[in-house]
Amino acid sequence: MRTVRVELGDRAYPIHIGEGLLVDSGGELLAAKGVLAGKSRALIVTNETVGPIYEARVVDALESAGVKQVDVVRLPDGEQYKTVRDLERVWDAAIEGRHGRDTTFVALGGGVVGDMCGFAASAYQRGVSFVQVPTSLMACVDSSVGGKTGVNRPGGKNMVGAFHQPTAVIVDTAALDTLPLRELASGIPEIVKYGLIRDAGLFEWLETGGGVEGILARDKAALAFAVQASCENKAAVVAADEREGGVRATLNLGHTFGHAIETSEGYGEWLHGEAVSAGTVMAAEMSCRLGWIDRALVDRTVKLFERAGTPVAPPRGMTAATFRDLMAVDKKVQDGKLRLVLLKGELGGCVVTGDFDPRVLDETLEFFCGK
Amino acid sequence: MRTVRVELGDRAYPIHIGEGLLVDSGGELLAAKGVLAGKSRALIVTNETVGPIYEARVVDALESAGVKQVDVVRLPDGEQYKTVRDLERVWDAAIEGRHGRDTTFVALGGGVVGDMCGFAASAYQRGVSFVQVPTSLMACVDSSVGGKTGVNRPGGKNMVGAFHQPTAVIVDTAALDTLPLRELASGIPEIVKYGLIRDAGLFEWLETGGGVEGILARDKAALAFAVQASCENKAAVVAADEREGGVRATLNLGHTFGHAIETSEGYGEWLHGEAVSAGTVMAAEMSCRLGWIDRALVDRTVKLFERAGTPVAPPRGMTAATFRDLMAVDKKVQDGKLRLVLLKGELGGCVVTGDFDPRVLDETLEFFCGK
């Protein structure tokens, strides 16, 4: 087992990464780490796909850690259910089970479950603790770490939520064995992201045969390396800027374009990572057109996504006007001005800026979408 | 104008109290205080009763402070609308108006509007700032200060919310001129509360002819004194314990009984302050039965509420079993054990404890509700 710490003072927490932590020894691990010591109640938040496979093991783990009452709420599976309406089911399950402020919620699932469970925990009785047990690659390498939680609105992705840090993240890479290939692949763009914004070595590792293909083949060493390297990058950025006042926004490379795609297509049509994949290509193309990076880096990025099998262009039929409209509600907008994460300089360099020629954004949108 | 500060480090804020601050000189005040300096957008959250009377003045105030875009969302009036469903209207109005993280929400109304606007602000784009402009006595003396925000669930009051401090509270006592008498009276139990838990002088002032009757007559000096004294008490307690780890729970005197009444009767049937009135009598009665206070203090408390015209007993037909069931989800429950705010010793003394003979709670409930 390897452990990465997220250094956030009195909100610091560990990310435990290992093979079989949940499947083989979840109870032992949770108990040993004392995350749930002395808790009388816990509420597992999972979904209808993951729950039947793993929830019994987590219930056992919690009970063997001494938790007296373990309740489970299964949400429907998919981004289209990342809604306020489905959050209410979590809150009412907690009330029904008489959970108090000393309960712990446990997010067992992918990014949607983690984001919803975390926001539900942040608001239940004005705040209870929660643990992340990610079961998708997306969640293992990105969404389970850093405390961004929330739900979507029809008008925008993640428009309602909270910064609420988990008390621990338990990553069992064996859980990725049961993940459908499309979902596995959709985690890769977030790993590419860390490479592009700050970790040239990780990007270059992905380019090797053992990188992208190793992940897709579920090679244990490749998965462990990719998850650990990603968590180390994420932890370092979050520790430096928990509430996204500065550098944390760089983690949103490709996301402003990507969120527009998800909102436009209807949540759940494109997986989040697929939208980020296309969005990252768009951000790279725009950076190149601004003269900030070499064309070669755009090509290398496209090549990685092609090997992962994730999109390198937005959906057909999506217009430049739709992009402009939906990007105007991005959370990085300041004083009405759109700011974007763009690449600059060598591999690993980026900026968050509203200081670019707006015609280049228009050209980029028209390049991908037509006039 | 008088100003009370809530000392919370980098979240400290002022409570400005005055006659005509909103009605006569709101724009000047808001501008002078710089609360909205440099903001490009603001969203006023109000209700269908208060909005038509005051919102145009607040729009003017904001515009004269340099805010370029001011949007308004009017919610239906009443505790029964303090729901997740109505919160969604606030979030969608903000998205529709393209509000970014640099917006400010303005709560213009009573406790329901303030709690909802505050929670909406805490979650919109994971957190934007907000200002409280309370227009009910309840909100002026209690709910607008301290950052407790949230909404109700069918299973319990304020079960979902956040601790989110406003950046300023603007109390115009002239706004209380338009408040219906029943609502005015319902603010008095929260003032009595400060007297009982920590401010014997305030309790004794209420007992004078200029106290309760002064408030009911909307005497300007009486209102100003009551609001300022209440805010000073609230600010001191909140500064000592922002997240209710200890002493802040004392502000919930009568509220565990009261919330059970509100939930049982249906939100909006009894006003919050009316339920607190009956609940405070129940807490005082129980404290007396435990031998912790003199019977005389129970009688003095009942007398004050009789003069205010607020209830001194729970609703007919509400059973001891219903109280026990609903009180079991109180936010002060720890490890399954109910804790209550009870009076102890001289006027002004209280404790938060689960260490009482449970038969005395049963006796108290049966005294008020029958067997």
Image (cartoon, coloured by chain):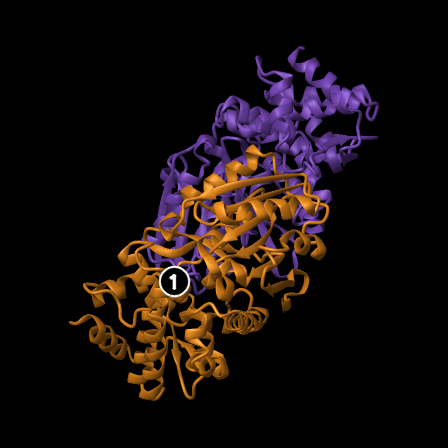
Chain colours: A orange, B purple
Q: Which residue is mark 1?
A: A181
Where's residue B267, x and y in %?
49, 28
Vertical order, A108 against A40 (above or below):
below
Q: Residue at x 58, y 58 (%)?
A: A165
Image quadrant where one finds the C terminus of chain B: top right
Residue A223 makes an appearance in the image: yes
Where's residue A64, x and y in %?
69, 46
Where's residue B34, x and y in %?
50, 61
Judge from the rendering whether residue B315 lies leftward or rightward of residue A161; answer left or right: right
> As shown in the figure, which amino acid type bears the numbered disc 1?
Leu
Q: Nearer the viewer, residue B112 or A339?
A: A339
Q: Chain of mark 1?
A: A
Residue farthest to the top, as pictured: B371
Q: Nearer the viewer, residue A299 or A137?
A: A137
Residue B214 makes an appearance in the image: no
Element assignment for label 1: helix
- Tally of numbered discs: 1
Q: Residue at x 68, y 32 (%)?
A: B253
Vertical order, A138 against A53 (above or below):
below
